[in-house]
Amino acid sequence: MALTEAEAKDLRTSSELYEALINGEDDKVIETCLGIPEGPLHTPTIHEDTVLALATNLKKNDLVLELLDMVPMHESHKLTCQNIGGNTILHEASYNNKTVEAATVMLARAPMLLGMTNRLGETALFTAAASGKTEIFKLLHREVCRTIHGPALKSFLQRDHDKSTILHKAILSRNYWLAHEIAVKHPHLINENDVDEMTPLQLLSCSPPVFGPKSFLMRMIYKLIDADIEDANTMFPWLRKIKKEKYQCEWAMKLVKVLVKADTSWRMTESYIKKGRSKVHLYGKSQSIDIAEQDLKPLTPLLLATINGCIEIVEEILRVYPQAIDHIDHDGRNILSLAILHRRIEIIDLVDKLKTQKLRVRRKIDNYGNTLLHLVAEREDEVTEDLKGPALVLQEDTLLFKRIKEMCKPVDAMKLNSKGKTAEQLFFDNNNKLRSDAKEWMSENAKNCSIVAVLIATVAFAAAYTVPGGPDSKTGYPVLKNKPLFLIFTIADAISLSSSLTSVIIFLNIVTSSFRFKDFETSMFQKLHLGLTLLIVAVTMMMVAFAATLILTISSGRKWTDITLYTVSFFPVLIFVFTYIRFYKQLGGAIYRAFKQMIDEALEHYRSPKPIVWQYNRHSRHQTVDGSRILV
């Protein structure tokens, strides 16, 4: 359909304004607005956004102030116009912190903007909380609290159609300082449920924040720097980033403390009476479990934090309410059961340290007759950042099964679940395919490494008979045998040959192994690590031998020539070391943790008071307690 001349002119004006706004040509925007009847209230977009709203959305504070001055005072009511989505210019200002000054002028000119809602029922205060913008939220919140009181305040704090509050939205925006301020100033919002019956703490447990760095070095840096971000703009970018991360961590922990103290959802637990029956034999009448599907309510923050591995929230809940450890979900599982099912090792460690409470939670059998040992076999598949090989996954599960077996009572290993299987049978059945994949993965790696080891051994063996400089024609001894680097070459070549041949034997032993489940606990990986270590030593020594040969045969005696030659010769060695340093760092960490655990257990044994031991002498009518005689 053809456009009229007026429509074509309006479209050209809209295009010029839109392009000028995007390109930052503020003077052109002002000039164009002065030449049209609607001025800054002209709508250049298909969503009916005004020039004033677009400038606000693009964070152009000075331009917005000039455009506001162009609207006559007697037409201030026109500032309340809305786009198709219902957003006003104050809504657009709530999405950023750079137009706070302009938002102040908007409210002074048109106070009714404060209470206007968009099509989703959101006020500007609500959108500021959802965007996590601190400065604009402070302004709007101050104005709301100053002018609105009583029941009318609810419409500013909560959205009608899904019952979400500004505290829900602040948590989802990851602005934990803002969420903490809201929780402190409006404590009644802490236990408010949204349409999905989720409280703010449940939302926080579903998407837990990062409470601190994992590496030792970063933790040390965190301790040294101040979390105040007021002066962060003058710092280096990397330091500014660290300060902001620490600031977020500290306020996240403060928010958790406030929310946990007010949350008692763990009291609404399922019955501890077992709905599932556990047996140690297959005889008698069987009892199947038929649990009807139902619309289940969201899990409590304690259980959600356990499933998502947020140890800080779990630890804080148990610190404030230690009795919450008895809390059970609709499947009859407690936090230890869920931690095992979802492989949250840190939370298993936390419960393991609680000596007395651990004795209570370890006895729990879920509604399907599963003990803690059964749940080791019932792994919940989850997408994780680390993509581990099947052998590593099987090793972790096997070691976890062994650990939980030591934690449980001996009778738990004999109990049958609702499927009529013991924990060991269930573990073998569910992990049989994983064992096949692990066998293939381990064999393939061992074969590939064997090929490399044989090639290195061949090169090292050949190098032993073609020494640098060659043999003396008269004596047959190497010409360069008195050179210091010749000794280095000889030692390096011998070590390379012996290491490579030894690694071949170890890798062949892996290939011919029986690949039992218990082999994946330690022995299989010990062989693999030893073989890889010897292979790395062989490659490193071969590089050292190559560097020594190169220097012995080419060195001219000139300083800069020798320096260059040394650098080029040993460069592959350095690259090789840095490539595998992470592998040996992990291996060293595992050895350190195992050693530390042994030391802790030994110290715990001597710290714990020795129990009173009753002794009985059949030739005497007296029993003794720690040497004290008691008359019977």
Image (cartoon, rainbow, N blue to C red):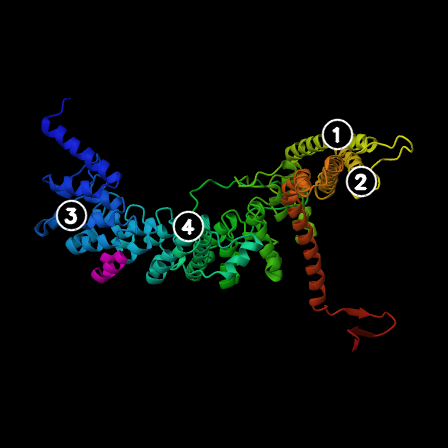
Quadrant location, the C terminus: bottom right
Mark 1 = which residue? Answer: 455
Q: Which residues are magenta?
A: 139-153
Q: Residue at x 55, y 58 (%)?
A: 220
Are the residues flagged by discs 3 and 2 in contact, CB closer than 8 Å? Answer: no
Circle 1 sits in a helix, a strand or a loop, which is it?
helix
**Magenta stretch: dominant SS?**
helix
Upstream in sequence: badge 3 or badge 2: 3
Upstream in sequence: badge 4 or badge 1: 4
Residue that extends furthest to the top in the rendered view of this protein: 1
Q: Amino acid at mark 4?
A: Leu
Upstream in sequence: badge 4 or badge 2: 4
Please check the rendered image and state whether residue 149 is part of the magenta-colored stretch, yes or no.
Answer: yes
Mark 4 = which residue? Answer: 203
* Residue 410 seen by the camera: yes
How far apart marks 4 and 1 lie (CA) works out to 57 Å
Q: Nearer the viewer, mark 1 or mark 3?
A: 1
Q: Nearer the viewer, residue 570 or 363?
A: 570
Mark 3 = which residue? Answer: 79
Are the residues flagged by discs 4 and 2 in contact, CB closer than 8 Å? Answer: no
Please check the rendered image and state whether residue 283 is part of the magenta-colored stretch, yes or no.
Answer: no
Count neighbours of disc 2 (C-alpha within 10 A) and say few if under 14, some if 14 to 19, many if 20 or more: many
Q: Amino acid at mark 3?
A: Leu
Residue that extends furthest to the left in the rendered view of this protein: 74
Residue 546 falls left or right of residue 374: right
Q: Nearer the viewer, mark 4 or mark 1?
A: 1
- The image shows residue 182 at horizontal and vertical percentages of 34, 58
Q: Nearer the viewer, residue 577 or 511?
A: 577
Above or below: residue 551 compared with residue 213: above
Upstream in sequence: badge 4 or badge 3: 3
How far apart marks 2 and 1 lie (CA) works out to 23 Å
